[in-house]
């Protein structure tokens, strides 16, 4: 199975500060990739590079086996960006098909009831569902999410991650999620990349990455890692 998105030896720096060093990763159809690491480890910068917002100084990025550099911005947006605008010609407004797809995306994310409401009137969890629906309306193959559960309570955190997992499975979407919530990443992601100082410290399945040794070394905090009794996935407690 060919990866939808693949990065080879990606390096990025702001002026003289190196932020990402020799990053390798790939996202396959139906796969959820969790990106973990402390503040300043390069998580959000990596997501922006994957999104095409930032251009790396070296390395190679591929979409479906083709180089990023061969894609126009509008073509790239069909794969990894948000919104319906990549599918519209200049000065063209949404037609019936675009509206049908948008409505279908709202239904898929259980957000159809919010269609007539302002996004500013929605709760945090409701707003996240609408934003994910907006991404789906583009019909992408990859969705990139940066801290999608920040400031949400436990109920809505669980709801957002379950929604992402369901959509990834049903639609064959590749998903990359940056998050500080190690337990949710371990619970719902099939693969995890753990960053430290801009480099990949560990990559693999949750059992391989979320260990006490790895977490303590990267986050510089003593932890206990045991098993969630319901899922069997790793669970982290601060000691």
Image: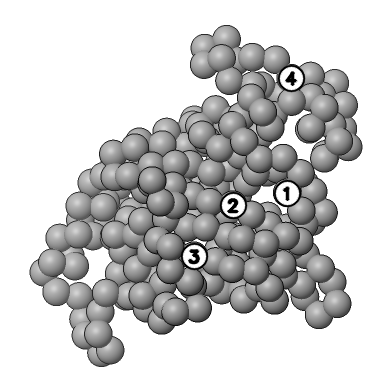
> Are the two marked residues, 3 and 4, in contact with CB atoms closer than 8 angstroms?
no
Taking the spot 72% from the left edge, 70% from the top edge, the residue there is 12
Q: Earlier in the sequence, mark 3 or mark 4?
A: 3
Secondary structure under tag 1 reads strand
Report the mark closest to the observer, 3 or 4.
Answer: 3
Residue 33's spot in the image, x, y percent?
53, 44
On the image, numbered disc 4 is attached to which residue? 225
Q: Which mark is residue 200?
A: 1
Secondary structure under tag 4 reads strand
Real-space CA distance between mark 2 and mark 1, rounded to the nearest whole angstrom: 9 Å
Q: Earlier in the sequence, mark 4 or mark 1?
A: 1
User: Which class describes the residues within 10 Å of circle 4: few (<14), some (14-19), or many (20+)?
Assistant: some
Real-space CA distance between mark 3 and mark 1, rounded to the nearest whole angstrom: 19 Å
Q: Which mark is residue 25?
A: 2
Report the mark closest to the observer, 4 or 2.
Answer: 2
User: Which class describes the residues within 10 Å of circle 1: few (<14), some (14-19), or many (20+)?
Assistant: many
Q: Earlier in the sequence, mark 4 or mark 2?
A: 2
Which of the pair 11/123 is nearer the observer? 11
Real-space CA distance between mark 4 and mark 2, rounded to the nearest whole angstrom: 25 Å
Real-space CA distance between mark 2 and mark 3, rounded to the nearest whole angstrom: 11 Å
Which of the pair 187/26 is nearer the observer? 26
Residue 54's spot in the image, x, y percent?
61, 74
> For residue 80, what is the image quadrant?
bottom left
> Are the two marked residues, 2 and 1, in contact with CB atoms closer than 8 angstroms?
yes
User: Which class describes the residues within 10 Å of circle 2: few (<14), some (14-19), or many (20+)?
Assistant: some
On the image, numbered disc 3 is attached to which residue? 62
């Amino acid at each position: 199975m060919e990866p939808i998105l693949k990065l080879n030896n990606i390096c990025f720096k702001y002026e003289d500060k190196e932020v990402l060093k020799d990053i390798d990763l790939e996202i396959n159809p139906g796969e959820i990739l969790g990106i973990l690491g402390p503040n300043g480890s390069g998580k959000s910068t990596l997501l922006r590079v994957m999104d095409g917002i930032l251009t790396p100084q070296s390395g190679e990025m591929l979409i479906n086996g083709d180089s990023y550099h061969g894609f126009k911005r509008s073509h790239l947006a069909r794969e990894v960006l948000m919104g319906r605008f990549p599918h519209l010609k200049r000065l063209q407004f949404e037609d019936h098909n675009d509206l049908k797809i948008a409505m279908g995306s709202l239904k898929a994310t259980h957000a159809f009831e919010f269609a007539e409401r302002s996004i500013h009137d929605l709760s945090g969890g409701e707003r996240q569902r609408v934003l994910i629906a907006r991404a789906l309306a583009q019909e992408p193959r990859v969705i990139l999410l940066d801290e999608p559960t920040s400031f949400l309570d436990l109920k809505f955190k669980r709801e957002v991650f379950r929604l992402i997992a369901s959509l990834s499975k049903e639609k064959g979407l590749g998903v990359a999620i940056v998050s500080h919530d190690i337990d949710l990443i371990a619970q719902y992601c099939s693969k995890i990349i753990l960053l430290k100082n801009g480099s990949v410290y560990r990559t693999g399945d949750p059992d391989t990455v979320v260990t006490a040794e790895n977490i303590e070394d990267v986050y510089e905090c003593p932890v206990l890692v045991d098993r969630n009794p319901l899922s069997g996935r790793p669970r982290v407690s601060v000691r």
